[in-house]
Image: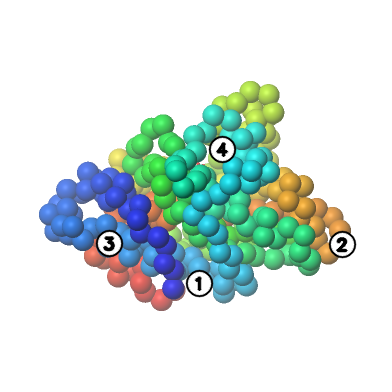
Amino acid sequence: MSTVSCEHFEEVADQIVRLYPELAAREGGGLQARVAALVNRLDDQFLKMAIDAGAEEIAIAEYVEKSLLVQAGYFESFPGEGLMEGAIGTRPPAACYQCYPQLSGKVLGESGLWTCVGTCGRNERETGVGRLRIFCMREIILLGSAAWVREQRARWLTTIARFARSLGLQVDLVPASDPFFGTGDAHGRKLVQQLKELKMEMRTRVGESIGLAIASFNLHETFFARRFQLRLRDGTDAYTGCVAFGLERWAMAMISKLGLAHALTVATEEL
Ligand code: ATP
Ligand code: ZN
C-alpha cells in the first residue's frame, strides 16, 4: 500500500478550499488528511498497474545531491528552472532521476520496467491551479530497445487513458514540450522534442484550468543511458522512457468532477 509522505499537503488543500469553499466548512481541519488519503489511494492504483505489468519497485530519497542533477543533464535541459532548496537538501524536480544511478552498471537484459514514487519540488514562478511547489510524482521507467520503449509508451497511453475515464475524468492526449525557453542547445532540443513527439501529455479540466497535465509520457532516446551507463545485454545503450503522474493533480481533477467523498470511494474500488 502506498504511503506517500503527507507533510506537504497544505498548499494543495488551500487551492482546493479556494476552488470549493464549501469543502472547508464540511471537512474542517480534516481536509488535508482526506486529500492525502485520496492521493495515496490513487497511487495504490498506479503502483498496482505497474507491478501487474512486471515493474520492480525502486525506493528513492526525499532530497538529492545536486551532483545527481548535473549528471542527469538537468541544468542543461532546463536552464533557469528553479529548484526547491532548503537547509536539509534539494528536492528532486522529478522522481525518475534517482532511478538511473540505481540501474547503472547492472546487467539489464533486453528490457525492463521499474517504478518509484517521491516528493518533488519545483520553484514555480506562477502558482495557478495545480501548479504546486512540492508535490508527489509516481513514475514508471521503461528501458529497452527503441522499438520496445516506443511500443510500451503507446500501451501506457492507452491504459492510463482508460483508467482516467473509469474514474470519470475526460482527458486529452497532446504532444508537448518541456517549458524551457533557452537558446542554443536547449532550444534545439525543444524543437526536436516536438518534432519527434518525445513528450505526450494527458490533460484534463480542473477548476478554471481546462488543460492541466496530469501525466506525461516521455521518450528519452539514449539521453540517460549515456549519462548513467545503462546498457542492454548486447552492449548497446538502452533507450529509456518514463510515464510520470502528478498525484495531487489527479486528486484535484477527481474532486472537481466527483466531489471529495465520491472521489475517495471511486479511487478505492478494485481496478
Ligand atoms: P506542466 O506542463 O504542467 O508544466 P511538466 O511538463 O513540467 O508539467 P513533467 O515534467 O512531465 O510536467 O512532470 C510530470 C507530471 O508531474 C506532470 O504531468 C504533472 O502531472 C506533474 N507536475 C509537474 N509539475 C507540477 C507542479 N508544479 N505541481 C503539481 N504537479 C506537477
Ligand atoms: Zn521521468
Which residue of the protein is positioned furthest toward the front in this rendering?
A: 87
Mark 2 residue element = loop
- Marks 1 and 3, how far apart at CA: 22 Å
- Above or below, 66 against 118 in this view is above
Q: Is mark 4 within 8 Å of ligand 1?
A: yes
The quadrant of the image that shows the C terminus is bottom left
Which of the marked residues, 1 or 4, is nearer the chain's N terminus?
A: 1
| Amino acid at dot 4 | Asp
Place of residue 156 in the rendered image (x, y in percent of width and height, measured from the top left): 57, 60
- Marks 4 and 3, how far apart at CA: 32 Å
| Amino acid at dot 1 | Lys
The answer to which image quadrant residue 169 occupies is bottom left
Verify CB contact (< 8 Å) between mark 2 and mark 3.
no
**Residue tagged 2:** 234
**Residue tagged 4:** 178
Q: Relative to 112, is 156 on the left or the right? A: left
Which of the marked residues, 2 or 3, is nearer the chain's N terminus?
A: 3
Q: Which label sits in the foreground, 2 or 3? A: 3
Q: Relative to 182, is 44 on the left or the right? A: left
- Marks 2 and 3, how far apart at CA: 48 Å
**Residue tagged 1:** 48
- Marks 1 and 4, how far apart at CA: 28 Å
Place of residue 160 in the rendered image (x, y in percent of width and height, measured from the top left): 50, 60
Which of the marked residues, 1 or 3, is nearer the chain's N terminus?
A: 3
Which residue of the protein is positioned furthest toward the left in this rendering?
A: 25
- Residue positioned 12% across, 54% down in the render: 25
The circle on residue 254 is none
- Residue positioned 51% across, 51% down in the render: 63
Q: Which label sits in the foreground, 4 or 3? A: 3
